[in-house]
Image: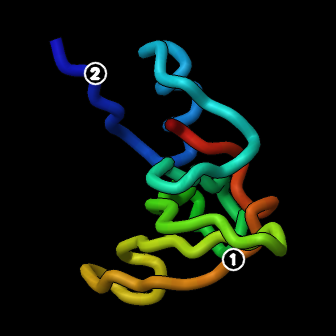
Amino acid sequence: GKRLITGNAKEWLSKAKELWFITWRSPKPWSIAVYLPGDDGASSYGHVAYVESVQENWTIIISDMNYQWKNIVTKRTVSSYSAAGYIY
């Protein structure tokens, strides 16, 4: 069957591990960055973002929704260290 991760973003890393997804501290293109509450401005629910690319200077370009405004997609460059982990 399908393996879906649902719920608050702050729970996605632990749920991903339970569902046997690969998780790691280093980003890869096309992975999901998981932010815990307060990380890089994440709300009390946490935040997730899609990793577009990994740069040479330990930054990543991510796409996400609801970061600045509800239902608005943003694309931004952030430190790869600001995420709690990545789901591959």
x 52%, y 71%: residue: 62
- Looking at the picture, how far across and down is residue 48, in whole percent? 49, 57
x 46%, y 87%: residue: 68
> Which residue in the protein does label 1 denote?
78
Query: Which residue type does callout 2 highlight?
Result: Arg
- Alpha carbon of mark 2 to alpha carbon of mark 1: how far? 28 Å
Of the numbered discs in the image, which one, if any, rests on residue 3? 2
Q: Secondary structure at mark 1?
A: strand
Q: Is residue 20 left or right of residue 23?
A: left
Q: Is residue 76 above or below residue 33?
A: below
- Looking at the picture, how far across and down is residue 88, in whole percent? 50, 37
Query: Which residue type does callout 1 highlight?
Result: Val
x 45%, y 53%: residue: 30
Q: Is residue 15 above or below residue 26?
A: above
Identify the image quadrant of residue 59: bottom right
Q: Secondary structure at mark 2?
A: loop
Q: How many marks?
A: 2
